[in-house]
Amino acid sequence: MIRETLFRRLIEERGWTTVQTFSLHFSRAARELADLTGERALRDVIVSRRSFDRWKRGELQGLPWADTRRILEHLFGEPVAFLFQTVHAPSTKNERQEEVSRGPVAERTPRGRSPERLARETDGYARRHMPNGGSTANLHATDDEPFDQRPTPVALGPADGYDELLSCIDSARTISLTMVKTFMDQTELLRTMDRQLGAAGLVEQMTGHLATLEEALTFTVLPQTRRPVALALAGAATLAAWQALDVGAVQLAWRQYELGKKAAQEADAPMYLAHAMAEQAYVLCEAGRPETALELIRGAQRAGNAQMSVRLRAWLFAAEAELCARAEKRDDCRRALDLAAAHLPEGDEARDPDMLSIFLNGEHLGRWRGHVLALLGEDDAVSSLYEALDSMDPTFVRASSGLRVDLATAHLAREEHGQAREHLREARLVASRTGSVRYRRRIEHLTRKL
């Protein structure tokens, strides 16, 4: 049964009700506290999904690890003992008015309590909730936070977390190749929905999918079992990162690319590593660092080395050409476009069987080439882009917004303002329907130039 606690009320007020969202704010608080105290180890404290779910339901047998408690107190401005106390909604009109006058719970702090009162109330909480009475002097870590490896050096009580840990490990042993395929099929479904409907409506589903994969990998022990799960996580994290970038959540995108890279390394999958690095370069480019982005994408090409498929290699060269254009390196841009065309396999097939996130054939490359030429301000960009528009796969709904933006860019370079406005109007409709913040920013930038 769910117990209403101050912690639950605070996260609901702030909209931090998923483990991914909460973890972002918890990590930020951990970094702030580490900087304030000089204790760099605080930066490494994390919250597991299992712990967050227990905190949210109010199912605690004790309090979290000492470092975790400090970060929670820094984040919320309340002693941890109060955070996990049961709270009740005001029952009378006067109580409700008093509650309103005090302001949102999320904005209150314990400043009004004296240190003596804080100590008395915290010890009282400990006596009521800890085994054998106890006080804050001997609060011990429980399985509520098993991943913080810096517990206070005190004796462990009965709730040491080993039973639950072994239970999690035993559960992870049941993960079979069939289940890994199910994970990948779910990623593929989310990829298709993203392509056609946009990322904005998939945030919760993608968050849950990633959390499931991370949990599975965390408690899977043997390397031969971890590698397939890590590969599934690498693909899902990279997709989630691209979606986050599209909806404007750039810090989340960066972190998810880092997760994808680490998973690819554990899976010993150079292609997945190269792809994650290359897409992460776009975050840098969007942030105004095209030179650094170009270095990263060339590093991705080296990371993939000889183990890359030819289609992925062509994709990387096309991406390099785009970043060269943004860095105003025209000669390098032309060279990379030529290399992309030279490495692209013949035929209409667009999907890379070894890298399902890669779609690239002659039509796709033609659209990409038109985009690059538009960035360079080349006159022949218009003809390339109209050819791409005529042959575009209708299932790439969000990408059609980008193509319209490119056409507007190309017409604007030729001072053809009427055509530019028409394409921007079409682009805006699609970007609004798919929730693409990234494309809306480009549209608004071009609109200001008209």
Image (cartoon, rainbow, N blue to C red):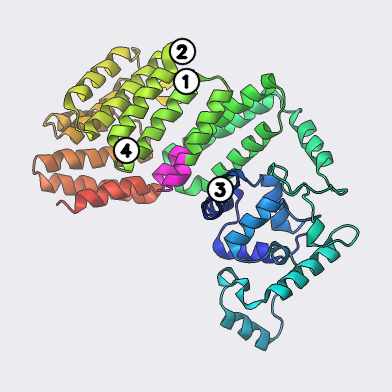
What range is drawn magenta here?
A: 239-254
Residue 334 in which image quadrant: top left
Q: Name the residue under label 1.
A: 271
**Which x, y percent locates residue 316?**
35, 23
In this figure, which residue is indicated by the disc labeled 3? 204
**Whole-number angstrom distance, CA of label 4 to CA of label 3:** 27 Å
Q: Name the residue under label 2.
A: 307
426 and 164: which is toward the camera = 164
Q: Do the residues labelled 1 and 2 touch (CB within 8 Å)?
A: yes
Q: Can the viewer see residue 182?
A: yes
Amino acid carrying mark 1 in the image: Met
Q: Earlier in the sequence, mark 2 or mark 4?
A: 4
Which mark lies nearer to you, 1 or 4? 4
Residue 146 bears which disc, if any? Answer: none
Is 244 colored magenta in this rendering? yes
Identify the residue under disc 4: 285
